[in-house]
Image (cartoon, helix red, strand yellow):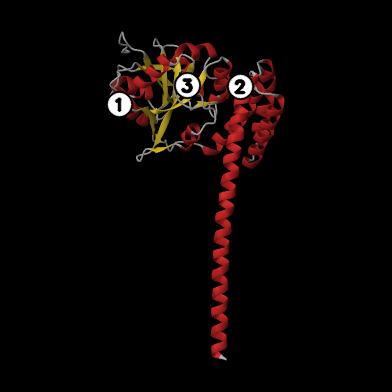
Amino acid sequence: MNRTPANARISIVVLTYNRVDELLATLERLLALPDNPPIFVADNGSTDDTVARVNASFPEVRVIQCGGNLGAAGRNRAAACVETEYIAFCDDDTWWAPGSLERAVQLLDAWPQVGVLNARVAVGANNATDPTCAVMRASPLVDDELPGPALIGYMAGACVFRTALFRELGGYEERLFIGGEEALVSLDVLASGHAIVYCDQLTVHHHPSPARDSALRRRMLARNAAWTAWLRLPAREAASATLRAFGVFAKERTVVRDGVQLLRALGWAFRRRRVVPAQVLDMRERVRLAERKVEVAARHADAHVAAHVAAHVAARAQAEARRARGNVDAQT
């Protein structure tokens, strides 16, 4: 049974795969929210009794069985069942803080040009702001007509979408599976004329699951960045992304396997290729230039610190040498 109050404006979609204990803890927190939102779990074919345990513990939550591991595209299956105007997405190790959903509805009601809101992600028991959110907060795309800094991307497990927009864009591309899957959707959101906005007033808590394969994720991020570039970006950027992907594959010693997979899919990418408008490319360039300035400043700061430390070490070495010479002179 799915609870859907008549006045519900926003639903929650939770993506999960084989992390039932974390999922149950997340659902308990979500069910305690004062908004009483309808909750949908997109289960990517879990083999750890996820469906049975959720149904037994929380019959008011609707589980959408994807029939297999669709990666990020599992969210599409659950989103298709949502009946509310807005969707708040999270994962099985993230959950929305009280008050955030109500505020998201207020903001999207007031700013119809905003298609996606990205929440602040509070990591761990100390609620430290995720570094990605710190970068978002400093976005150079300031617009007084928006409720926060404009972005060129968002975090799939910490965002609120207009339901109609998500469906219109087709959600997540199944071929990308997972890892940077937001990039393609972000480009399509911006190309549609909608804005993506970072909002500190919304909070998602994240206690990262230890069940992660970092090496696999790095390879998939690189592969997906190349495919996304061939799907939506100018050829020069696509070629650069492809070269970077092969660099990652070389480090991971998976050039043959991952490289062949990447190249075989280029025909598919070319058939679906649709370069985004110039204004979107301009936004990307402005963000890239701002990030480059920050990197240069950080390198200069590191160089200054390194020079200071080196000078200190050299001074100590000289002092030790002088003391050593003094001891020798005293002994002779």
Residue type indicated by callout 1: Glu
Secondary structure beneath disc 3?
A: loop
Q: Which mark is residue 102?
A: none
Q: Is residue 29 left or right of residue 77?
A: left
Q: Position of residue 159 (x, y in %)?
A: 44, 24
User: Which residue is identified by label 2?
Assistant: 280
The tag earlier along the polypeptide, 1 or 3, is: 1
| Residue at figure coordinates x 58%, y 58% from the top left | 307
Find the distance from the CA under tag 2 to the CA under tag 3.
17 Å
Residue 189 visible to an observer of this rendering: yes
Secondary structure beneath disc 1?
A: helix
Q: Which mark is residue 28?
A: 1
Q: Position of residue 29 (x, y in %)?
A: 31, 27
Find the distance from the CA under tag 1 to the CA under tag 3.
33 Å
Instruction: Categorize mark 3 by other alpha carbons within 10 Å: few (<14), some (14-19), many (20+).
Output: some
Find the distance from the CA under tag 1 to the CA under tag 2.
40 Å
Foreground tag (2 vs 3): 3
Residue type indicated by callout 2: Val
Foreground tag (1 vs 3): 3
Quadrant of residue 262 within the rendered picture: top right
User: Which residue is identified by label 3?
Assistant: 146
Of residues 96 and 288, the one nearer the viewer is 288
Instruction: Categorize mark 1 by other alpha carbons within 10 Å: few (<14), some (14-19), many (20+).
Output: few
| Residue at figure coordinates x 54%, y 84% from the top left | 327
| Residue at figure coordinates x 35%, y 31% from the top left | 21
